[in-house]
Image (tube, helix red, strand yellow):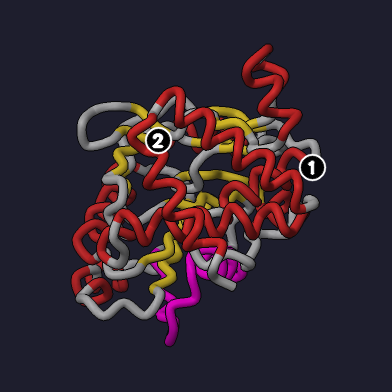
Amino acid sequence: MKVSIIIVNYNSAELLRNCLESIDNELDIDYEVIVVDNASNDNSITLCSRFREDSRYIFIESKDNAGFAKGCNIGAAAASGGILHFLNPDTELQKGASADYLKVIENPQYIYVTPLINRDGSVENGKMVLPLLGDIFWWNISRKRARFWCKGASVIISHENFEKVGRWSEDYFMYGEDLDLFYNFWRHNLKIEMLQVPVFHFGGGCSSNVWSTFDREVIVQRSFRRFYSKYFPKWKYVAVKLYFLLHNLIKHPSRVKFDIKAWKKACSMP
C-alpha cells in the first residue's frame, strides 16, 4: 500500500527542502509526496526544484493562501495512496521511519501520531486533554479515561478513515483544526496510537514568519472559540475557559495577563 505524504507549505523554503531531503534519504517504501504551496512569496518552489524531476514528488501551487486545513484537503484529494501522512514542512524524518510506515500499513484501522523532537532535544506532541468538561474531570482523576488530542504536525490516517471523519475542517484558517480533527476521531470511535520513531520538529518555523507571539495566541483563542461554537452551547465554552484561566493562575501565573488580553481581543473579532 502506498503512503502519500502531504505537506502544506508557506514561506518555509529551507525547512521544506530539508524535510523533502529527509524523506528522500530515509524511506525505502512505496510513497509519494504532495506539496501544497499556499502562495509562498519566498523561494520555496525554486529551492526544491530538483525534486520535480522525481515523479514521486508532486507540487500544487495555490494562487492564494488557503490556510492549513484547506491545503491538507487539497493534497489529500490529489493523493493516490491508501495511507495519508499529514506532515509539517518544519520537520525531518529520522532513521526507522520506514518501519513505522510498515506498521501503519499492516494496521490501517488506527490513527497514528508521531513524537516530535524539538530543537532543544525535548519531546513534544504528547497527549493533551480534549477541552471538554467531562474529559477535564477524568484527566485530573483517572487520566486513562480522558479523551485526548495531539498537535497536527505529524498525523497518519488511512484514506478511508480520513473521508469517514469528514476530512480536515476548513472552518479554521490555522490552529484549532487539529483539535477538531481529533475530536471527530473520538466521535467515530477510532483508536489513536503513538508511534515510536520521532521526527525532528523545528517548532514555529512556519507561523513565526507571519505572526508575533501575541497575534498567534489571539488566533489560537479565536479558533478555540470557533470549535466550541460548532459543537457546544456557549456556557460550556465560558466554563472551560474559566477553568484554564484558573489552572494558569495556579500553575503559570505569569501567563494569566497575557491570556486574558489575547482572549479579549479574540472575543472582539467576528
Question: Range of the magenta residues?
Answer: 57-79
Residue at the (75%, 53%) spot, across then down = 234
- What label sits on residue 160 in the rendered view? none
**Quadrant in the picture for the C terminus:** bottom right
Residue at the (63%, 52%) spot, across then down = 82
Query: Quick one: 154 or 69, which is closer to the camera?
Result: 69
Query: Quick one: 38 or 138, which is closer to the camera?
Result: 138
Q: Position of residue 125 (x, y in %)?
A: 45, 34
Which of the two discs, 1 and 2, sits closer to the camera? 1
Query: Quick one: 219 or 187, which is closer to the camera?
Result: 219
Query: Mark 2: which secondary structure?
Result: helix
First of labels 1, 2 by sequence position: 2
**Residue wearing tag 2:** 97
Residue type, mark 1 in image: Arg
- The quadrant in which residue 110 appears is top right
Query: Quick one: 58 or 145, which is closer to the camera?
Result: 145
When the figure is inspected, residue 118 is found, relative to residue 231, above or below; the finding is above
Q: Position of residue 204 (x, y in %)?
A: 30, 51
Residue at the (31%, 33%) spot, across then down = 117
Q: Position of residue 46 (x, y in %)?
A: 21, 76
Residue type, mark 2 in image: Ala
Query: Mark 1: which secondary structure?
Result: helix
**Residue wearing tag 1:** 187
What separation in Å lies between label 1 and label 2 (alpha carbons)?
29 Å
Q: Position of residue 152 (x, y in %)?
A: 50, 47
